[in-house]
Image (spheres, coloured by chain):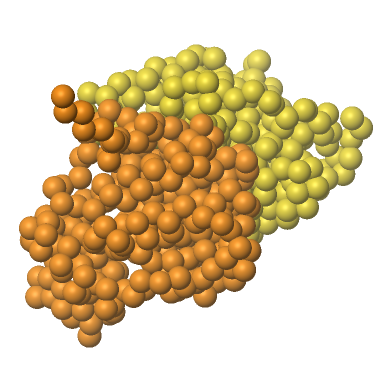
Amino acid sequence: MAKQLIKGNEAVAEAAIRAGLQAYFGYPITPQTELLEWMAKRMPELGRAFVQAESELGAINMVYGAACTGARVMTSTSSPGTSLMMEGISYIAGTELPIVLVDVMRGGPGLGNIAPAQADYNQMVHGGGHGDYFPIVLAPSSVQESIDLTVLAFDLAEKYRAVTIVLTDGNIGQMMEPAELPEMKPLKKDFPDWAVAGIKGRERRVLTSINLEPRLQEQTNMRLIKRWQEVTANEVRFKTYFSEDAEWLVTGFGSAGRVALSAVRQARAEGIRVGLIRPVTLSPFPVKIYQELAAKAKGLLVVEMNTGQMLADVSLAVAGQLPVGFYGRVGGITPFPDEIVTEIHRMVNEPMQPGEDARVRWLSHLETAR
Amino acid sequence: MVNPIPQQPVYTRPAIFTETPNTFCPGCTHGVGIRLVAEVLEEMNVTDHTIGVASVGCSVFAYNFFDFDFVQAPHGRAPAMATGVKRALPDRIVFTYQGDGDLASIGMGEIVAASVRGENITVIFVNNTNYGMTGGQMAPTTLPGQITTSSPNGRDVETMGYPIRTAELLATNTGSSYVVRRSLHDPKNIRLAKKAIRTAFETQAHGLGFSLVELLSTCPTNWGYTPNEALTWLEEHMLPYYPLGDFKVAPAVAELKV
């Protein structure tokens, strides 16, 4: 397929359709709505299921029902909508069903605003719904990567019977870029051996997240954690840039990772040996690459569009091997490369003191800047 | 020699029941509702392509009793989940089995929306005027003055409002094709309830849209009555507030021969 100029949200929708999406259920919310609108037009013309639900609660439970039939299903929303979906996500995880959820993040908490943010990191990566479960979380930083990761999301969801989240934001959802869409895949015809479809020729199946007997619930929990270990062993994905000889490191995901790359290029042009780690799977988190590169570096700067959520996972990964600093813009503001270049200079010229708190340092710099 | 008396079974267990013993309290009419659904689906010969959607509350155990495919919804969300199943597999029979706390309180959004869409599913709605599973708290259906564990002095309509008449409310939606109320308190009404359940499933089987049968049911344990007293209480107190009747029968449904 040739490259075409396409909007992030619409690219995700079309990629899902071409990956064999059989049913879509959603609810309008900015900055995600183009995705729903694309589905509203395309799914019925292809004879596939589309429902604009009464709420995000309705949408996620329609997804739950359709997933029980073994169909390829998805929903999409933005931050406030994900909060409403958390109940369903927990049930779906407990029932061990494959689904894809696209979260086009916006500023929060509460209604916040409709500008791009990355403040749902903790909610998505560390659960959000109740109980012990592990979602796969993929973080694209371009329209092309949104397409590729959406296709991958369906395969991973089905392979591991896992909730798989494409965590994008208002920048990537709303921007137009040249990108290549995949070929249209035929819809799958076989039902998995756990799906409900009617008992013709077989024993009945019951799909539920209930286990009143604690021993059975423990078995479910153990099955989930063991499956998660497989995911962790096989599905870690990340990108590194200029990392070969890096003395200093920057890391960020999605939009923030992309802006950070511009900053790293600029710093390289100035002669600073700085490299970038951009995690593609936020969950499972690419712990090893941080440990490997941290062993050869003098400092690491975490850049996010939140107040330091991935910061905790990065700090845990490097386990004190090197000082970890932080720079964030919040409330729906995307940082400019220049701001990050300034922070790279600061990391190099004013190294963090042992025991210095990354957030305290960040806030004091923000104050000074004002 | 005296001829042996010819034997004719007057009561058999529906073949689509599992071996799981009934777990409802003695005298509770939930078991009657479950049985009527089993009889109807068996008579329609559709159980090999039926998918049930269980809800939360006493009705949660529905999936234990039917020997066909079932899924289990979060509290109140059964109509949304059933929508997902039905849209993915439009040629299957899909039904929810929900109580009044589940359907008329936490799940009011989902049931109204499913009805508005004219979703081609069947809803069996068991109204026993309280939250049975959690020990008898006030539900939206609890009658004025009725004592429950969370309305210990009786439901005071000044602060707790009036009970909701679900069937009447849903009947106002153009999307509803068949919405009726029946009762399970005596044999005659049980037979009428069965006929209504059959009509509801036939509505779906003919692709005629949303169908719901509200079944007035007893809860002797939480009401604090013997099974017989509970049947009388239903008749004397519930029937006046919740009149039995057909609140919506679309013309195409009226033509069905049941």
Residue drawn at x 87%, y 44% as measured from the top left? A5
Q: Which chain identifier belongs to the orange chain?
A: B
- Quarter of the image with the N terminus of chain A is top right
Closest to the observer, A110 or B191: B191
Residue at 45% over, 70% down = B246
Q: What is the x, y in percent for residue B54?
A: 38, 44
Q: In which quarter of the image is residue B64?
A: top left
The percent position of residue A260, horizontal first and vertical second, equals 65, 38
Q: State whether residue A70 appears in this view.
A: yes
Position of the C terminus of chain A, as image quadrant, is: bottom right
In the rendered image, the residue lying farthest to the right is A2
Question: What's the residue at 34%, 60% (across, down)?
Answer: B215
Left or right side of A220 for A145: right
* Residue ranking furthest to the front: B1
Q: Where is residue A163 in the image (x, y as percent from the top left)?
A: 51, 34
Relative placement, left or right, of B143 versus A69 is left
Q: In this view, does B3 lie above or below A367?
A: above
Residue A31: image x %, image y %? 65, 56
Q: Which residue is drawn at 13% across and 75% down?
A: B154
Horizontally, residue A229 falls left or right of residue A290, namely left
Give whichever of B185, A47 is nearer the camera. B185
Q: In this view, does A186 lie above or below A231?
A: below
Q: In which quarter of the image is residue B184?
A: bottom left
* Chain corresponding to yellow in the figure: A
Label count reads: 0
Q: Nearer the viewer, residue A289 or A203?
A: A203
